[in-house]
Image (spheres, grey):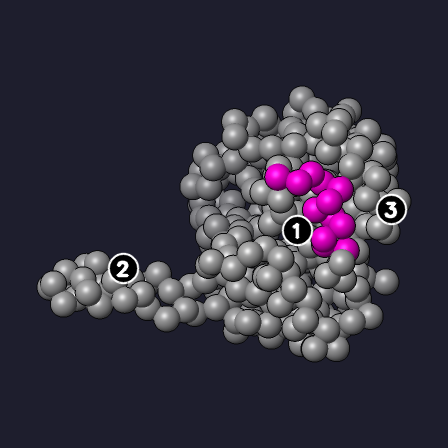
Amino acid sequence: MAKIGVQAMMLRESVAEIGALETLRKVREIGYSAVEISQIPMDEANVAELDKARHEFGIEIAALSANLTRTPGVNNDALEGDLDKIVADCHRLGTSMVRIGMLPFECMTDLDKVLDFCERVEKAAVTLQESGVGLYYHNHHIEFAKFSREGEFDGRYMLDIIAERAPSVGIELDVHWIQRGGLNPVQVIEQYAGRVRMVHLKDYRIGLMAPEAFEALGRGDRAAFMRGFSDVVQFAEVGEGNLDFANIVPTAVRSGADFLLVEQDQLYGRTVWEALQTSYDNLVGLGFSDLF
């Protein structure tokens, strides 16, 4: 049975302030019972509290997060360097999935570097499988850029290249970023059916233009006005934007997703608890209470 949970990137400030245990207590009080761990230091104190929350609150750890290499300023372990620790943490926390949140920045415009990334994550995925852990790749919009090279790739999406060249790596789809990449989330989920065990639920909202844009226009600064005109895409609580979650959620479940994870990159003045409550209420209102 699929379960709706929370992407813990949203919880990193709370964990730093009150600890993982009390943070997950608040998550459970809203009604969520699963979290995907990301951008939270996996030191002994946090791992112990995550484990305690599993047993005290019935919180399921959907997946852990890792980068390919150690990245300054990012609180994720590295597949190249921390693999034994990652496996041990997975076993301790009762999860069989690790996800990569993003490919290295230097790969984003270089096909050869993308192919090298694929080779390295495929190797890590095969090694993880030997310990009963699956590796998954999370998309943003950049993966819907097209690469072309004579005799090899003819206008293919980066995500499709990653999927082909790293066949042991599953796909974690983010519906907001699919929409921002110009594709239909339902169709992309269906395309990867059977390979997707996690889907990020994040709405896509067109906000109103900021007053500053019109002030710039009044000063004759048309370039600043046009920047404001273009910069209206927002992250939104599930059900507060334009995505069709009434179809997205059942499509994800039919396609084999075990976890549907609520995430919102920016909150626009709201607290994380207000945002998570709104997403929970809207998903229940859509008829998905049985997935909590």
Q: Which residue sits at x=62%, y=37%?
A: 16
185 in relation to 267, above or below? below
Q: Are marks 2 and 1 in contact (CB under 8 Å)?
A: no
- What crowding class fits label 2: few (fewer than 14 Cα within 10 Å), some (14-19), or many (20 or more)? few
Q: Which residue is at a point 72% across and 73% down the rendered structure image? A: 284
Instruction: Compute the Cα span from label 2 to label 1.
Output: 30 Å
Decide which of tag 3 and tag 1 comes sooner along the chain: 1
Q: Main secondary structure of the magenta part?
A: helix
Nearest to the observer: residue 216 or residue 143: 216
Distance Cα–Cα, label 3 vs label 2: 49 Å
Q: Tell me the quarter of the image containing the N terminus.
A: bottom right
Percent of width and height locating residue 167: 70, 44
Q: Which residue is mark 2?
A: 227
Residue type beneath disc 3: Glu
Residue 117, position as x, y percentages in the image: 58, 34
Image coords of residue 11 (percent x, y)? 63, 47
* Amino acid type, label 2: Arg
Kindly state the secondary structure of the residue where label 2 is placed: helix
CA gap between label 3 and label 1 equals 20 Å
Is 46 colored magenta in this rendering?
Answer: no
Q: Position of residue 200 (x, y in %)?
A: 64, 57
Q: Which residues are magenta?
A: 17-28
Q: Which mark is residue 56?
A: 3
Give the SS element for disc 1.
Answer: strand
Q: Tell whether 220 sits left or right of 73.
A: left
Q: Is residue 59 left or right of residue 238?
A: right
Q: Which residue is found at the position 74% from the left and 29% from the top?
A: 45
- Secondary structure at badge 3 equals helix
On residue 7, which mark appears?
Answer: 1
| Residue farthest to the left, as pictured | 220
